[in-house]
Amino acid sequence: MEPTANLNVLAMIQQGWLATYPLILMSVVSITVIAERLWSFRNLVSGTAELVRGVHAELARGDLDAALQQAETRRGSAPGRIFSEVVRQGEALDAEELADLGAERRFEEIEQLKRPLWILGTVAASAPFIGLFGTVVGIIKAFHNMGVQGSGGFAVVASGISEALVATALGLGVAIVALIAYNYFQVRLERIEAALTIGTARLIEMLRTVRGSASPQARVADGLR
């Protein structure tokens, strides 16, 4: 019978429970975070561009109420919250103050979007070490068994070492998935932040234009009083 015939990964995982069980738990947590962030990040870039076009068109017509109403319809998303706040304060604040307001709201929203990503970073950094810890413990146990039996050489410890190495393989697998997902979400966040920054700047510029075009009318109205 070939040596691989008796290979039972499940049994090896059970043998190395000290490291493999935590790694399995970390893999489940990582997959949950990945799925949740994929859902949260869906259509944010395209949705931001679409909302900017709609609000910008209303502002270009000089209808601030319609622009605010359109932004409010997306209040459940990051761009909706940012743009509705900027449009609401469009008449009370000047362009520089609106830019500061938009930057503050963008920072808050990006922090909320990246908040769970520390879990993926922690898993990516710690999983290989947990797997290595399990391997070292398994090898120590294997050599201890060889010392107790007093004979048999490497054949006695071969199966023990193979079981121990499962922990390292599992740790690397969990870490690789978490690291790839972490870097992917970081790139997505950069694109989302860029879309929010450009959209906010466009709306602020349009608000400034609308307010500038309305000011001569206000001066005429003041002169007629």
Image (cartoon, helix red, strand yellow):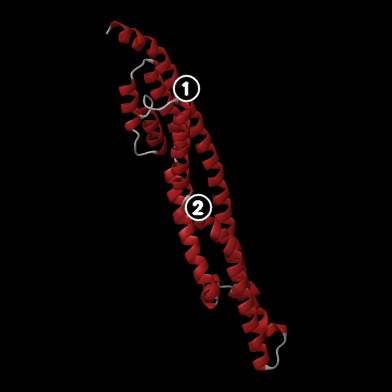
The residue beneath circle 1 is 205
Residue placed most toward the observer, 216 or 139: 216
Where residue 22 appears, as percent x and y from the top left, is 50, 69
Pointer 2 and pointer 1: residues touching (CB < 8 Å)?
no
Residue at 39% in and 24% down: 55
Label 2 sits on a secondary structure element that is: helix
Residue placed most toward the observer, 154 or 176: 176
Q: Residue furthest left?
A: 225
Up/down of 50 relative to 8, above or below: above
Residue at 65% in and 75% down: 3
Label 1 sits on a secondary structure element that is: helix
User: Residue flagged by tag 2: what amino acid is it?
Assistant: Leu
Residue placed most toward the observer, 220 or 115: 220
Residue at 57% in and 64% down: 127
Specify whether 112 is left or right of 146: left
Q: Is residue 1 visible?
A: no
Where residue 80 appears, as percent x and y from the top left, is 38, 34
User: Few, some or many C-alpha atoms within 10 Å of disc 2 (few <14, some 14-19, many ≥20)?
Assistant: some
The residue beneath circle 2 is 117
